[in-house]
Amino acid sequence: MPSAQGAPATIRLVLADDHPLVLSGLEHLLASEPDCEVVARCANGKEALEAVRRHKPDILVLDSRMPIVSGLEVIRTLARSQSATRIVLLAESSEEELIREAVRLGVRGVVLKEMPRAALLQCVRRVHGGEYFLEWRSASQVLEELLKQEQGARDIAGLLTPREQEILHLLCRGQRNKEIAKHLSISEATVKVHLRHIYEKLQVKGRLALLRYAEDKGLLRSIRS
């Protein structure tokens, strides 16, 4: 929140990079900004996790390649713990799969190492403000997929009962009626009744049409992942 004088809120940061010169450069860049405060600097992923737990910063600026605990594992660990700290990932353009996975795990900011220093400042401020900063085609595509999946899940939840949603998920995982019945401890006849209701509610004709519907809504990727 702004101060009484209208100054912007201070952004508390933890910096993590295993190259001392890069780490010093990041600290110099960010600490010199009036709205930024560097509360810790870390040389490996284990230190980064400990610093986030200790200081609870607003932003973790994290290098993609970290020793001891990898950058991706740091992201996974913080995602599992539902940490409020938002992550800005420093990555190389060649790390496309890593970037895509990081965004799927909730990373809001991706800055390529070849970008100008001003991009990092812009990214930190936008992510702190609740926005996304994904100046990389791959990451932007993943975000679009995730938003599509979220909307698709909301659409499904508004139309189907919880049991029908369970059956849809199992069907999208490739299970046949007999397998679905066994998994849910119900009869095959009951599965068929539920499927008929699902077809009617989603206005599709048959299993293949239902799978196409799920794919169009972006659900197949999330269900099968």
Image (spheres, grey):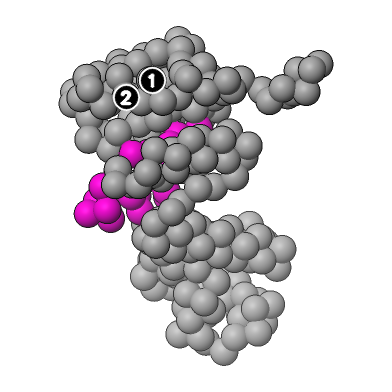
Farthest top residue in view: 54
Identify the mark at residue 28; answer none if there is no mark. Answer: 1
Asked if the residue at tag 2 contacts the one at tag 1, i.e. Cβ–Cβ closer than 8 Å, the answer is yes
**Residue 213 visible in the current orientation:** yes
Q: Quadrant of the N terminus?
A: top right
Is 124 located above or below residue 174 in the figure?
Answer: above
Q: Nearer the viewer, residue 39 or 174?
A: 39
Question: Horizontally, is 120 left or right of 19 in the view?
Answer: right
State the image coordinates of residue 13 (x, y, percent, origin top left): 47, 21
Q: Does 34 appear in magenta?
A: no
Return the x and y of residue 224 as percentages of the image width and height.
38, 61
Q: Position of residue 99 (x, y in %)?
A: 33, 50
Question: Residue at point 62% right, 40% down?
Answer: 130
Q: Label 2: few (<14), some or many (≥20) within 10 Å?
A: few
Residue that appears at 36% across and 70% down: 174
Q: Is residue 150 left or right of residue 27?
A: right
From this view, report whether residue 158 is shown above or below residue 28. below
Q: Mark 2 belongs to which amino acid?
A: Gly
For residue 25, the mark is 2
Residue span colored magenta? 86-107
* Secondary structure found at label 1: helix
Dot 1 amino acid type: His
- Residue 83, x across and y down, in percent: 50, 27
Residue plotted at (27% across, 53% down) = 93
Q: Residue furthest bottom?
A: 205
Residue drawn at (49%, 57%) of the image: 143
Q: Note whether 18 is above or below 142 in the view shown.
A: above
